């Protein structure tokens, strides 16, 4: 209190001195000859008001000095101690103001805004088992809630995933209020107050991860549960050599973005992993099985413990059959119809046009069937089927032209009609046999590999076509010889 009195006394003395200076200034101005009339009177009134205030301050200062003179020596020592304490307080306030801190703000709140209290900052940075020099074990579960389709062309698929993590950290017990067995923390609260393993989906597409919700549960037993739901576009490399009879494994991989294998080890939980019933309904794939596991991944200096959820699916062949296989077979059968047209001169153009147009239309279907595949897709069953049908259609065009040459150019009418009738049976035979072998052997469970089946189909078609064409040339030569003999006999 004495310090405050002294401060007030000093202020009073300062005010008195300032007041006397004001009086001198007023007096000096009042003696000027410039002051006239009402202006001079107003100025003098202001000076008198200032003198009155100075007089009041002087009286208050005199009263304070009388009170100080009556204090004993013990009271003065007590007041000196209080003054020293007040000076320390003011010094601390000046330091806080100089550091940009609000003097009325508690120190604990400032530390929390800087990233957590001093007591919890070590808990957020240090692993629970760091002092024991052993890795922390994190149990994980991955549950596929919704599936949004496979994009083979971009090697990706979209999924709505629930990730569950569990680990032990006895330090979290101090955060649970008395009377509660567990406490729920938000994402921001958990990052400030407890240690987190930093698990992320590692094979997600860049900037294609949409976090929906996060919750962290801490228990008095030291168990920490984290549940996170997100929608992500996952990148993977599809195996397309069996397309369209392919089976794909859709992996979702997780790992710590911060800790290596020696720090954090993942372990699949007994519960929490799987897929929702009817996950693949309405998709072009059917669900086969789901598996969750963990493995160690070493790539140079990068050594991680990774968890993975593998969803195995089979492509549904119905759409491929309806949109490609059946239209292709129909075009093939239409091309056979050229040999059922009347075998006379006016039908040369319709016969040739039909055989060529069916070939062109099926070429368009082959391009359309390969659109879902990326540019670097390997040779697959779809290519084998398309090539087999195209080869048979090309054989139709060749044999049709051959029969027309025999009829109109070589004048071998009997042989031409025979070839036309034989093709009504021969072309369906080579098409059905070659395509039947391919369709019976295709797929991952077929009795021949794709390379062996493709080679067999090529050899089979080439052998039949070559044999028939050689036989036809032999008969053409024989027919031409007979025609020359008839011409010689007519000349004679």
Image (cartoon, helix red, strand yellow):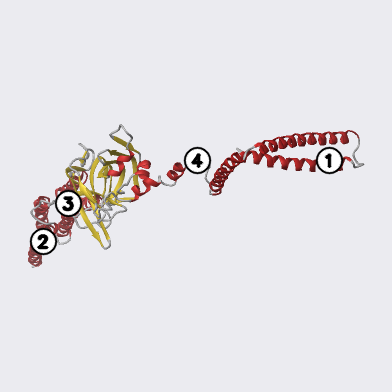
Q: CA distance from mark 4 to mark 1?
A: 47 Å
Instruction: Say which label, 2 or 4, has the lower sequence index.
Output: 4
Lateral position of residue 163 relative to residue 22, left or right:
left
Residue under label 3: 344
Residue under label 1: 26
Measured as percent of width and height from the top left, residue 54 is found at 76, 37
Where disc 3 sits, the SS reads: loop
Instruction: Say which label, 1 or 3, has the lower sequence index.
Output: 1
Instruction: Say which label, 4 or 1, has the lower sequence index.
Output: 1
Q: Say whether residue 401 is visible.
A: yes
- Nearest-to-viewer mark from 4 and 1: 1
Q: Residue at x 91, y 37 (%)?
A: 36
Residue under label 4: 105
- Nearest-to-viewer mark from 3 and 2: 2
Find out whether the residues at labels 3 and 4 contact each other: C-beta distance under 8 Å: no
Q: CA distance from mark 3 to mark 4?
A: 106 Å
Residue 459: mark in rendering: 2
Mark 2: few/some/many CA within 10 Å (<14, 14-19, 20+): few
Where disc 2 sits, the SS reads: helix
Instruction: Say which label, 1 or 2, has the lower sequence index.
Output: 1
């Amino acid at each position: 209190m004495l310090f405050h009195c002294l401060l007030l006394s000093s202020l009073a003395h300062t005010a008195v001195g300032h007041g006397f200076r004001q009086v001198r200034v007023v007096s000096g101005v009042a003696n000027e000859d410039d002051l006239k009339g009402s202006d001079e009177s107003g100025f003098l009134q202001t000076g008198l008001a200032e003198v009155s205030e100075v007089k009041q301050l002087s009286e208050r200062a005199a009263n304070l000095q009388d009170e100080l003179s009556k204090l004993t020596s013990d009271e003065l020592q007590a007041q000196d101690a209080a003054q020293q304490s007040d000076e320390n307080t003011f010094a601390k306030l000046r330091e806080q103001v100089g550091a940009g801190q609000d003097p009325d703000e508690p120190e604990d709140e400032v530390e929390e805004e800087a990233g957590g209290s001093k007591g919890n900052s070590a808990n957020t940075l240090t692993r629970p088992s760091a002092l024991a020099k052993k890795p922390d074990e994190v149990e994980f579960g991955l549950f596929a809630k919704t599936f949004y389709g496979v994009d083979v062309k971009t090697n990706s698929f979209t999924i709505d995933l629930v990730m569950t993590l569990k680990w032990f950290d006895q330090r979290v017990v101090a955060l649970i209020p008395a009377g509660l067995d567990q406490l729920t923390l938000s994402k921001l609260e958990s990052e400030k107050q407890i240690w987190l393993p930093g698990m992320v989906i590692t094979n997600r597409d860049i900037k294609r991860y949409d976090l929906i919700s996060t919750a962290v549960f801490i228990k008095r037993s030291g168990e920490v549960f984290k549940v996170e739901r997100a929608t992500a576009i996952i990148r993977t490399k599809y195996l397309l050599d069996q397309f369209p009879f392919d089976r794909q494994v859709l992996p979702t991989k997780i790992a710590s973005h911060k800790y290596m294998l020696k720090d954090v080890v993942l372990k699949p939980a007994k519960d929490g992993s799987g897929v929702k019933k009817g996950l693949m309904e309405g998709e072009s794939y059917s669900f086969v099985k789901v598996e969750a596991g963990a493995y160690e991944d070493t790539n140079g200096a990068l050594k991680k413990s990774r968890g993975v959820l593998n969803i195995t699916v089979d492509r549904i062949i119905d759409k491929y059959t309806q949109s490609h296989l059946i239209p292709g077979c129909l075009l093939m059968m239409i091309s056979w119809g050229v040999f059922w047209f009347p075998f006379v001169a006016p039908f040369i153009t319709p016969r040739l046009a039909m055989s060529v147009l069916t070939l062109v239309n099926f070429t368009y279907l082959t391009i359309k069937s390969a659109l879902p595949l990326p540019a670097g897709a390997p040779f697959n069953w779809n290519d084998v089927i398309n090539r087999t049908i195209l080869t048979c259609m090309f054989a139709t065009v060749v044999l049709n032209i051959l029969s027309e040459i025999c009829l109109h150019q070589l004048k071998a009418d009997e042989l031409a009609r025979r070839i036309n009738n034989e093709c009504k049976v021969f072309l369906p035979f080579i098409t059905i046999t070659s395509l039947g072998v391919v369709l019976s052997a295709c797929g991952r469970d077929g009795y021949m590999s794709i390379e062996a089946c493709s080679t067999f189909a090529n050899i089979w078609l080439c052998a039949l076509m070559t044999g028939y064409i050689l036989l036809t040339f032999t008969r053409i030569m024989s027919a031409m010889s007979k025609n020359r003999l008839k011409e010689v006999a007519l000349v004679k």
